Amino acid sequence: MVIILTAGISSSSSDTTPTPAAAGGRCFTSIFSFGDSITDTGNHCHILSKAGRSANNCLLPYGETFFHRPTGRSSDGRLIIDFIAEHLGIPLVQPYFGGGSTVDFDGGVNFAVGTATALDSDFLERRAGVKVTGTNVSLNVQLDHFRRLIPSLCRRGTDDELSGKNSLFILGEIGGNDYNFALSDGHSLKQVQDLVPLVVGSIISALKEIIELGAVNILVPGNFPMGCLPFLLNKFPSTNAGDFDPSTGCLTWVNEFVEYHNDLLQTELDRIRELHPADMNIIYVDYYNALLRIYQAPKQFGFSGEPLAACCEGEGSVQCGSPSVRPCEDPSAYVNWDGIHFTEATYRVIAKSILEEGLFTNPQFSASSCIAGNSGKAFPNSF
């Protein structure tokens, strides 16, 4: 069984069982993920649907590029978690809330939910005065769902599956919403910075619990360069050229804040590694620099559209998914999809840099040693 802790989205669109792949010499057979909309494959939409509600990402044009229908993914197509699953040769990971008792979780489970925070929403409001707008499915709530699912997984599992040797865990990206909600509420940079040790602490607490439950191979992504998001660029306009990175046009102060989060997360990961044996693979995934290099040279990676503009973005409160908002003609030309999330083309480049090029992970994540029948090409179907 492969377990991935991420912020991710899963899909049931895969009807075949590809050849398993591996990291660190271990073949993976399933993925379990935790996080937010960066990796949510449908949970948010399923939760809202059961409550008689909906969200824009539950509608077209979301999903138009690859699935040709909305799947609950906050993109025009596949996410990083989808490319990881394809690369590992396993089915796309199912959303936990997707089908109740009828869902087949043999390929893993995705617990990630759009709008999810690392900290519990009541804690954020009580401690920091930050109001969470969305479903209250924080990282801790996702772990609760995982704990409840374990008995049924164990009843069907082999010894290797129960030991976690064949499971890949990906924890994150998560925490971005904690900061976005705070910034949207008008909190000062100092107030948002005060949240960082708490957010990182929540991630590390989840990591410790996952290890206690048997995780051996764990990917822990950092946050993206949020200062490049059209959402925040529009929220914090400035006539001061010094507020922007001359090489990208991104908000410098926001990206420096994200670097603080990522640095603290890596420091804590180093401490966790010291407490566990060498065969425990706790791998930091540098989403920040994997995406930043695209903004620094977008045309080099095939992006001909304005790099700091969104393909599908409305004005004011009107969002992508609204009838009045039309997406760009070619989403693959754009880095950003809807002002906050990214296009399938961007996620493909990031996944390729991690899985095929061996970049932006510490230590390096090797996922190709068990891939067979692809003539040495690591991404036969995706890239």
Image: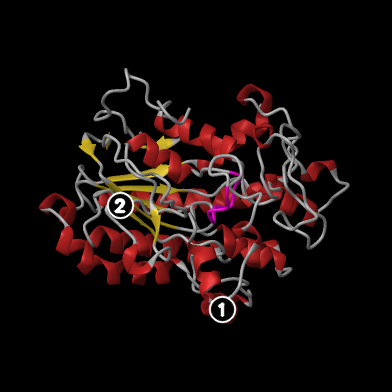
Residue 186 seen by the camera: yes
Vertical placement of 172 versus 329: above or below?
Answer: below
Q: Nearer the viewer, mark 1 or mark 2?
A: 2
Residues in magenta, as a range: 69-76
Where residue 213 sits, quadrant-wise, is bottom left
Looking at the image, which is closer to me, 85 or 123? 85
Secondary structure type for disc 2: loop
Give the residue pinned by disc 2: 3
Q: Is residue 116 visible?
A: no
**Do labels 1 and 2 touch, CB within 8 Å?**
no
Give the residue drawn at x 37%, y 54%: 5
Q: Is residue 23 above or below residue 259?
A: above
* N-term mark: 1 or 2: 2
Q: Residue 255 in the image: x percent, y percent?
A: 64, 47
Classify mark 2: residues with Cα within 10 Å, few (<14), some (14-19) or many (20+). many
Seen at 34% across and 59% down, the residue is: 207
Main secondary structure type of the part rendered in magenta: loop
Q: Say above or below: 304 vs 149.
A: above
Q: Which residue is mark 1?
A: 127
The CA span between labels 1 and 2 is 32 Å
What residue is drawn where x is 44% and y is 43%? Answer: 82
24 to the left or right of 193: left
The spot of residue 301 in percent (x, y) is: 61, 25
Image x and y of residue 81, in percent: 44, 45
Kind of residue at disc 2: Ile
Q: Secondary structure beneath disc 1?
A: helix
Closer to the camera in the image, 158 or 143: 158
Q: Furthest-top residue in view?
A: 375
